[in-house]
Image (spheres, grey):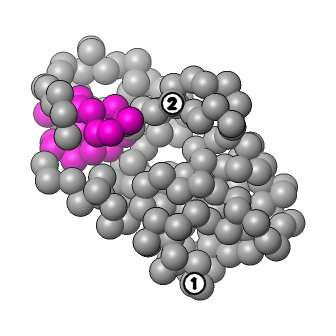
Amino acid sequence: MRKRKPVRIKVVRKLVEVLQNDFGIDEKLDGMFLETAEFGDLRLLLANKEPIAMTLMRPEDLGDQDNITFPTLKGILRWNLEKRWCAVDRGAIPFLMNGADCMAAGIQIVDPEIERGDLVWIRDEEHGKPIAIGWALIDSEKMDESTNGKAIRTIHWIGDDLWTIDT
């Protein structure tokens, strides 16, 4: 982690508003110790030394290159999000936990609002716990119908460097 610095809520207010508007998060971060940091290509927002959100550039091959703000896996666990997710069967979990891309065959349930180029989170079908975050390579309708090929390009998963970051 580089360029880590404490910030006041007013410095990251726009980022927090994006999270609140896009994901329905109602937690107020006013009383928390907030920091920003760089972690590879990610810009992180840390609350009480825990990375809860990231901002990154959408890949060129997935649409307009703009900055996207999305919760990290720890942020998803914190806020119990119910938007932009897909659920995978038990067979896909070991591969995802090793950083593999998510194949369409393993996806069982999909949020119907997912479009190609969106950041989405992948959860365990049985327990609903987050496993990974990645870029949707196809829209939700195709994810639901497809039985082969990649559906999500994984960028963050349980056990990766961001998950185990030493705060």
Marked residue nearer the N-terminal end (1 or 2): 2
Q: Nearer the viewer, residue 147 or 144?
A: 147
Query: Which element is circle 1 on?
Result: helix
- Where residue 59 appears, as percent x and y from the top left, is 59, 35
Name the residue beneath numbered marker 2: 57
- Where residue 116 appears, as percent x and y from the top left, is 73, 43
Query: Which element is circle 2 on?
Result: strand
Left or right: 34 in relation to 111? left
| Residue 43 in sight here | yes
- Separation (CA) of disc 1 from disc 2: 31 Å
Q: In the rendered structure, find residue 20 and report the number of the disc placed on it.
A: none
Under mark 1, the amino acid is Arg
Q: Nearer the viewer, residue 103 or 53?
A: 103
Within 10 Å of disc 1 (Cα), the crowding (few <14, some 14-19, many 20+) is: few
- Where residue 98 appears, as percent x and y from the top left, is 43, 72
| Residue 35 in sight here | no
Image quadrant holding the N terminus, namely top left
Left or right: 2 in relation to 146? left
Furthest residue in direction bottom, as rendered: 91
Task: Check if residue 45 falls in the magenta segment.
Answer: yes
Q: Main secondary structure of the magenta part?
A: strand
Position of 167 relative to 102 (above/below): above
Q: At 76% from the left edge and 51% from the top edge, which residue is drawn?
A: 138
Q: At 51% from the left edge and 38% from the top edge, which residue is drawn?
A: 24
Q: Are marks 1 and 2 in contact (CB under 8 Å)?
A: no
Name the residue beneath numbered marker 1: 90
Q: At 23% from the left edge and 29% from the top edge, which residue is drawn?
A: 36
Q: At 47% from the left edge and 39% from the top edge, which residue is drawn?
A: 70
Task: Check if residue 106 falls in the magenta segment.
Answer: no
What is the span of residues highlighted in magenta in the rendered image?
33-53
Under mark 2, the amino acid is Met
Which one is in front in this view, the residue at disc 1 or the one at disc 2?
A: 2
